[in-house]
Each structure stands twice: as C-alpha cells, then as structure tokens.
Image (cartoon, helix red, strand yellow):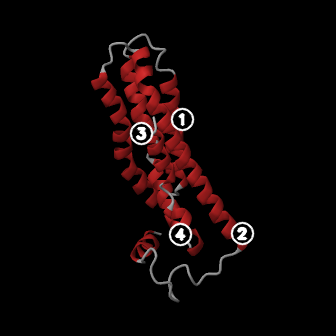
Amino acid sequence: MASVGFQAEQEPLLGHRTSGSREWDIIETEEHYKSRWRSIRILYLTMFLSSLGFSIVTLSIWPYLQKVDPTADARFLGWVIASFSLGQMVISPIFGLWSNHRPRKEPLTVSIFILVVASCLYAYVHLPASHNKYYMLVARGLAGVGAGNVYVCVWLCQIHIHPDTYGPVSSGGHPSLLNVLSHGSM
C-alpha cells in the first residue's frame, strides 16, 4: 500500500493525463462518483466546524479565564492561546504517519474524540476549587491535539482529486479564510 501512495506522490497534481496514468484510464461508476463527493463534503464540513469552533472559543478565552481564575494575567493568556497551536503542531505529523500506515478513519475518529473531551474539559474548567487556569491550558492544548485532523482531512480531499474536483479542493482553505475574516472584522 505504501508503494501506491509513493507512486501517487510522483505524479504531477495537475499534470499530464496520459494513457497509462494511475486513475485517468478507469471509468468511474455513478456510485463511486457520489461516494467521492459525499466524502469531500463531509471532510469540508469537519474542517469548517473545526474552524468555527476555534474562532468562537478563541473570542471567549480571555473573559472566561478571568472569570475562572482572577490570578491569570495576559502572559498566561498567551500560553493558553499558544497551547492550541502547539498541540496541533506536535500531533499533526503523528496523525499523518498514522494515516499512512492504518485506515484513515482511525486518526480522524480519535482526533474527534479528543476534541470532544477537550471541549467538555473547557466547559467545566470553572468547577475545580483551584488551579483552574492550568485546567484551561490543558483543555486548549488537547483541543489543538484534536484539531490536528484538519491536515488529514486536507490530504484526504487531495487524494480524491479528479478533474471535476479541482475547484472544490482548491477552495479547501475557505473554512480557515472565514475564521480569519471573522477575527478581522471584530
């Protein structure tokens, strides 16, 4: 299976579709076509919801942090916000390696589970009697780990590239763009 992935990496993404290339000689059935588009739509929905959740939570971190632990200062807020990106940076290559050697649904399922756990921890970070800011730091770091699935989603969209999906795959940054625009307009 690894040799097929390596072979696919050697072919130009938008390159020549000559006879003998990997996918272009295969006639696609209607069922496969619908399945491929359903997969792309589900992956885009996953990426959009992840970006939307990131922007909503990011806007609420500072007031929530001040409420749950008045000793937290702006420097600690920086660590809380950075922990998301650090978690995502550390786990993304691991999810990538995992998806290269195992079924791709596994890292996606695990990352979504981690994201749900992190969101629950974030929601209930006000309950402990002390050290609430550290619980929030852990919750945001775990949320970043859970958000590491975005790169697996983008890769999965790219392996579904077919001549009629160039447009949707090239617009894969729209969820992130909407996230940036929502922050810029505030």
Label 4 to label 2: alpha-carbon separation = 20 Å
Horizontal side of residue 18 vs 40, given as left or right: left
Report helix, strand or loop for mark 1: helix
> Which numbered disc covers residue 144?
3
Image quarter (top left, top right, bottom left or bottom right) of the C terminus: top left
Q: Residue furthest right?
A: 30
Residue appearing at x 27%, y 25% in the figure: 75
For marks 1 and 4, the one nearer the N-term is 1
For marks 4 and 2, the one nearer the N-term is 2
- Tag 1 and tag 4, C-beta contact below 8 Å: no
- Tag 3 and tag 2, C-beta contact below 8 Å: no
For label 2, the crowd category at 10 Å Cα-Cα, with few meaning under 14, some 14 to 19 and many 20 or more, is few
For label 4, the crowd category at 10 Å Cα-Cα, with few meaning under 14, some 14 to 19 and many 20 or more, is some
Horizontal side of residue 48 vs 87, given as left or right: right
- Tag 3 and tag 1, C-beta contact below 8 Å: no
Q: Which residue is mark 2?
A: 31
> Which numbered disc covers residue 166?
4
For marks 3 and 2, the one nearer the N-term is 2
Percent across and percent down for residue 147 are 46, 43
Label 1 to label 4: alpha-carbon separation = 32 Å
Percent across and percent down for residue 96 are 41, 55
Percent across and percent down for residue 89 are 35, 46
Report helix, strand or loop for mark 2: helix
Mark 2 is on which residue type?
Glu
Label 3 to label 2: alpha-carbon separation = 36 Å
Q: Residue furthest front?
A: 185
Report helix, strand or loop for mark 4: helix
Mark 1 is on which residue type?
Val
Q: Which residue is mark 1?
A: 116
Label 3 to label 1: alpha-carbon separation = 11 Å
Q: Look at discs 1 and 4 and give the one toward the viewer.
A: 4
